[in-house]
Amino acid sequence: MLLVNMFGSKWRPLLSALLICAVIFELASCQKDAQEQRTTPGRKPKQNKPKLGKLTNKGPRAATAKPKMKATPAAPAQTVLTQVLNRGKFKKVGETISVQSGDTLELRCRGKPVQWSVPSYLEEDDDGRLRIVQHERYGVLTLVNSTGADTGEYTCYPMYCEDTDCRKEYDKAIKVFVFFPDPHELFVPSSDYYEVVQLRSNWPTVLPCQVTSPEAEVTLHREFPPVEVAVDGTEISFNVKKGITIHRPRPYHAGALFCVASLGNLRQSSTKYMLIYVNYPMAPPAPIILSSSGSVVVGENLQVTCSVVGEQDVGVEFTWEYPGQQIGRPLYTQESISPVGGGATRQQSQSVLLVDEVRDVDQGTYTCTAQNLQGAKSVSTTVKVVPKAKPKKPQTNKTG
Ligand SMILES: *[C@@H]1O[C@H](CO)[C@@H](O)[C@H](O)[C@H]1NC(C)=O
């Protein structure tokens, strides 16, 4: 039931694949939407002057930097994103940082103003733990009572403003991946008991089994039969910020998989991932249409054939438009799939529209639309209907 079988009836698998696809795209765009900025503009700049001790300012820009009007020591000029630690200490952030879950995360980003993006879970579930304040020269993000679920990417976007019109400077965005190691939760919790993941033949698949601690050891497992799946670093790799990536999905990767994380005495399983393999075409179909005759006599039969040659096991769905459609002429189609050539890596999918006992209303344009997961293309042909020849007069038949 979990495996979409592209070998059997063509219709339902394609539809369900499209459905899954739609759900996935929906999720993706939801997440993108959720990444939209939030900022609390226009807070009065606080005149706090943290004692930073000795500032070393040896960056390449230091020499050309204009002398400041007011010597207000902020974070060092070349350090754009910093973590504020206890007792007013600042620490430049690298690619990742760890904050013990329960503790407060405080990030400071230079720019006037800046915008932030946080893991989508935090955006959606605003329970008052996240606070964003813009000061004169920098923005501050504070997250209190943190949990392992807050693990993820935190991004600061410096804004470019002309008068009141501001836009994010994407190329200057600074990202930091923050882990919130939780002694009880090795995996970033997921609200779902299982997730359906589409394995597309032409696209890497990510199983987002993210850990709350960068030290956790992560392995991949199959439910039935219960075996460990090798994470070899080439076919399947693990990235502590992303999870597991299957680089070139194949049908044998399909099934129910989950990750196991271990750290110290703790060993936990992730959400289950239901992997569904979908043969993904390289391109939209290129249908060819052919009618059995360009002009048909009333009462005779007509066949219009639409065919597509494409990759093996890639579903193609055909739809028809024809002249008698408006008045509800009940035509029917016959569909088939057959291998092409000796190599059999390609197949021909075909739909034949059958018009029995042609009438005048059947004259006109026949259009076939072929669709696969990459897109659709239509082709048309016109058919002329000619009246039945009048019975010839008896005397012309006579001979002699
Ligand atoms: C953080 O946790 C403390 C202690 O449980 C609680 O009193 C406080 O209200 C929490 N703060 C927020 C913003 O949730």
Image: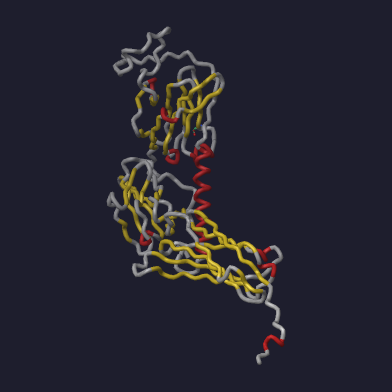
Q: Position of residue 344 (x, y in %)?
A: 37, 68
In this rendering, is residue 242 above or below 202? above
In the image, taking residue 75 as reference, residue 286 lies left or right, namely right
Q: Position of residue 53 (x, y in %)?
A: 33, 14
Farthest front residue in view: 400
Residue 272 in view: no
Q: Considering the image in quadrants, where does the C terminus appear?
A: bottom right
Closer-to-camera residue (369/294): 294
Q: Position of residue 96 (x, y in %)?
A: 35, 34
Q: How is the image coloured?
A: secondary structure
| Residue drawn at (62%, 72%) of the image | 296
In this rendering, is residue 349 above or below 49? below
Farthest top residue in view: 69
| Residue drawn at (41%, 47%) of the image | 208
Q: Quadrant of residue 387?
A: bottom right
| Residue drawn at (45%, 14%) of the image | 48
In the image, taking residue 25 as reference, residue 323 lies left or right, namely right
Q: Position of residue 162 (x, y in %)?
A: 53, 20
Closer-to-camera residue (220/378): 378
Q: Quadrant of residue 367?
A: bottom right
| Residue drawn at (53%, 27%) of the image | 39
Q: How many labels, in total?
A: 0
Farthest bottom residue in view: 400
Q: Quadrant of residue 324?
A: bottom right
Closer-to-camera residue (268/354): 354
Residue 116 in view: yes
Closer-to-camera residue (267/328): 328
